[in-house]
């Protein structure tokens, strides 16, 4: 794997919600082509961290750089520009419920990128075909399975030509038999060199894909390292404990 | 100065006497209306098939006719077949029957939301049908119906102003008379409006209190 | 007595039905005005800052707390003539019912907006939409659909309230029923007829909105 320049760099993110500190100075950087996987117990702040990277949650403190350009979230135009370049995949898909699969992918192209309708249509069709949903383009979200919904949401993000993608537990809301189809789409992205930061508890999947695993707890990064080391003999005892628990669970699942 | 004297000497006492009439209209209407609502709502769920039809017809007509039309029927219509009501009686009858029809829908919905197991449990203990209804089902259902019925009571307070249309001179009527005499329409109707706002606010406060007071821990009153 | 009543109804019916058209015009006007005002009020009530929300709250309290009849008198005899605008009773009825309806419609819409999952807004922002675009292209298309049952209810309330326009002398159905009744002395029959016409109009309107609701429904989405 060839690692390029740093795509995304976040430093010292702090966030308090309802008087409780959720993030206590989290820093991280992702280089081109790299895939980092965030793990940690629930309540560790992983989701909040991902959402504060593209300012869906406004951090109280901390800075973000995209390709070494600092992002100023108070500059609305720059913020919208930045968010287009950071694809976000949500745990519960968040497809626009009133739009067909095709329109879900088109809407960003038309309303944000200002593309002509027919151009947008072609592009959206390509993206949907890429995630294997050529035959479902006119279905509404409520008519799709969870796995199909998540693949539409990936197509929607890809259509914006993101430089990096943030995936927040992309398969945790799925029935076990539907996880595979989403994993294979993500794997396909990895092969084509997409830079990703992903939260997941699918440890086998993470092991096969990640360039680095990052362990988070109580709003802090406790340890990070290559998957083999992190999953078998981590230095920090909390990491070891968590990984052995999660290994056990995935053993049962798979 | 002249204005102030007018305000305190003429307007204020007149509006207060009007308010008193309004309250005399509202309180019996709330009591009769709630009773009608409970009776019609209960009959529409647990009544004899004929009674079900009767209560359904009642609800359709009294919710479907504008209240003003109903008041005119009571006050101007019935005398033609020899039935006479005073303005106040006609207004109270009109308000009660109309409000009852609306409230019965909340009672009905609440009754239908009570789980069947409650009924079975009471029967298993040897309760008769009527006793089950009175001591097990209704106490639960009425708590659930309370927010909706409370809303109807607020509506009733506002619509009590229509009594003026059948010559029952309550708050709105007094305001109209004062305003026509002094030509100070804006000022007087602003004051009248403010009095209604106070009335409505006090009523919703009381209803909220009642809801809290009657609430049973863990018993969800507001169904989604 | 009964034959006389029926004759009065028969003769008065065309005149009454013309009056019903006035009610329909008032309701449509008020619904439209209420929507035009209620939509920004709802959006402001959900997404506005503290001050905006406070002002909208006061508007809603005012128009939901004061009786229709008082507002009609206040606007017709008071505010409109005070400001020198020469408006007909018909216009004032539409304006007042519209202002009241805006308060109610804003609450219907607000409820619909708040019932949407938070993720809809987040997803829209995540692909680079501005908040305005997200509200316009993602939130409102869903919220408006969800509001249709509420509008159906609002329509039936407005229709019945439109009878109160009679108090200003608008020649709507109720006014005409009273007029014919005074001439023929068949009050009971004419009021009952007026009542049933209102009932029928309510039924037709809510049926129509129900058809619309099904028609714009998103497959598998709306109950």
Image: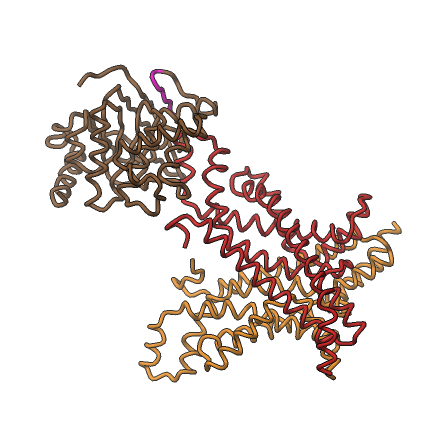
Chain colours: A brown, B orange, C red
**Magenta-tinted stretch:** A61-68
Foreground residue, B72 or C77? B72
Residue B24 lies in quadrant: bottom right
Q: Position of residue B115 (x, y in %)?
A: 36, 69
Q: Is residue A47 above or below residue B73?
A: above
> What secondary structure is the magenta-colored segment mainly?
strand
Foreground residue, C109 or A18? C109
Q: Is residue B20 above or below residue A30?
A: below
The structure residue drawn at horizontal position 84% and vertical position 60%, both measured from the top left corner, is B10
State which quarter of the image contains the C terminus of chain C: bottom left
Would you say residue A53 is visible in this rendering? no
The structure residue drawn at horizontal position 17% and vertical position 38%, both measured from the top left corner, is A242
- Considering every residue shown, the one lying at the far right of the view is B2
Residue B223 lies in quadrant: bottom left
Foreground residue, A41 or A120? A120
Q: Position of residue C123 (x, y in %)?
A: 39, 36
Q: Is residue B65 left or right of residue A4?
A: right
């Amino acid at each position: 794997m060839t690692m390029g320049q740093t795509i995304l760099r976040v430093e010292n993110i702090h966030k308090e919600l309802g008087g409780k500190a959720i993030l206590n100075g989290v820093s991280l950087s992702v280089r081109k082509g790299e895939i980092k996987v965030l793990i940690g117990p629930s309540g560790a702040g992983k989701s909040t961290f991902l959402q504060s990277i593209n300012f869906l949650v406004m951090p109280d403190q901390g800075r973000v750089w995209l390709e070494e350009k600092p992002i100023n979230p108070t500059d609305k135009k720059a913020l919208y520009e930045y968010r287009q370049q950071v694809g976000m995949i949500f745990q519960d898909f968040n497809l626009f419920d009133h739009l067909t699969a095709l329109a879900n992918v088109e809407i960003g192209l038309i309303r944000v990128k200002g593309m002509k309708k027919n151009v947008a249509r072609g592009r959206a069709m390509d993206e949907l075909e890429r995630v294997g949903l050529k035959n479902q383009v006119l279905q509404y979200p409520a008519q799709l399975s969870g796995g199909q919904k998540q693949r539409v949401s990936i197509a929607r993000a890809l259509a914006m030509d993101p430089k990096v993608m943030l995936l927040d537990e992309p398969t945790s809301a799925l029935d076990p038999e539907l996880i595979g189809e989403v994993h294979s789409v993500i794997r396909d992205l990895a092969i084509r060199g997409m830079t990703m930061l992903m939260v997941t508890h699918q440890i086998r999947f993470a092991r096969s894909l990640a360039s680095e695993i990052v362990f988070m707890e109580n709003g802090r990064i406790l340890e990070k390292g290559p998957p083999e080391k992190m999953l078998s003999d981590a230095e920090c005892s909390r990491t070891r404990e968590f990984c052995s628990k999660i290994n056990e669970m995935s053993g049962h699942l798979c | 100065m002249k204005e102030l004297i007018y305000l305190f000497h003429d307007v204020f006492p007149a509006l207060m006497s009007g308010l008193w009439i309004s309250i005399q209209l509202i309180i019996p209407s709330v009591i009769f209306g709630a009773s009608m609502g409970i009776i019609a709502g209960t009959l529409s769920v647990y009544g004899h098939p004929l009674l079900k039809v009767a209560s359904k017809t009642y609800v359709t007509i009294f919710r479907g006719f504008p209240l003003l039309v109903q008041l005119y029927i009571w006050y101007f219509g019935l005398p033609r077949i020899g039935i006479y009501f005073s303005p106040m009686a006609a207004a109270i009858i009109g308000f009660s029957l109309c409000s009852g029809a609306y409230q019965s829908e909340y009672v009905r919905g609440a009754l239908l939301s009570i789980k069947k197991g409650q009924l079975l449990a009471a029967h298993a203990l040897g309760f008769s049908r009527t006793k089950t209804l009175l001591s097990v089902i209704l106490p639960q259902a009425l708590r659930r119906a309370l927010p909706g019925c409370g809303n109807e009571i607020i509506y009733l307070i506002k619509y009590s102003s229509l009594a003026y249309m059948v010559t029952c001179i309550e708050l709105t009527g007094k305001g109209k008379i004062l305003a026509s005499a002094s030509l100070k329409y804006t000022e007087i109707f602003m004051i009248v409006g403010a009095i209604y706002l106070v009335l409505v606010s006090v009523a919703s406060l009381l209803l909220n209190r009642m809801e809290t007071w009657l609430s049973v821990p863990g018993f969800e009153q507001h169904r989604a | 007595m009964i034959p006389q009543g029926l004759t009065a109804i028969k003769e008065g019916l065309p005149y009454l039905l013309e009056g019903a058209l006035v009610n329909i015009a008032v309701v449509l006007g008020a619904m439209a005005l209420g929507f035009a005002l209620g939509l920004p009020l709802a959006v402001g009530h959900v997404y506005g800052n503290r001050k905006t929300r406070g002002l909208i709250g006061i508007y809603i309290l005012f128009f939901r707390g004061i009786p229709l009849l008082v507002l009609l008198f206040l606007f017709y005899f008071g505010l409109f003539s005070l400001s020198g605008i020469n408006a007909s009773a018909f216009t004032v009825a539409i304006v007042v019912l519209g202002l009241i309806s805006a308060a109610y419609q804003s609450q219907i819409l607000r409820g619909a907006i708040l019932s949407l999952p938070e993720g809809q807004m987040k997803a829209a922002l995540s692909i680079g939409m501005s908040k305005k675009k997200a509200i316009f292209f993602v939130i409102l298309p869903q919220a408006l659909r969800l509001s249709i049952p509420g509008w159906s209810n609002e329509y039936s309330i407005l229709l019945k309230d439109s009878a109160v326009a009679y108090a200003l002398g608008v020649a709507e159905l109720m006014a005409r029923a009273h007029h014919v009744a005074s001439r023929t002395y068949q009050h009971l029959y004419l009021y009952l007829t007026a009542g049933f016409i209102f009932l029928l109009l309510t039924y037709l309107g809510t049926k129509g909105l129900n058809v619309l609701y099904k028609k714009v429904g998103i497959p598998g989405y709306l109950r």
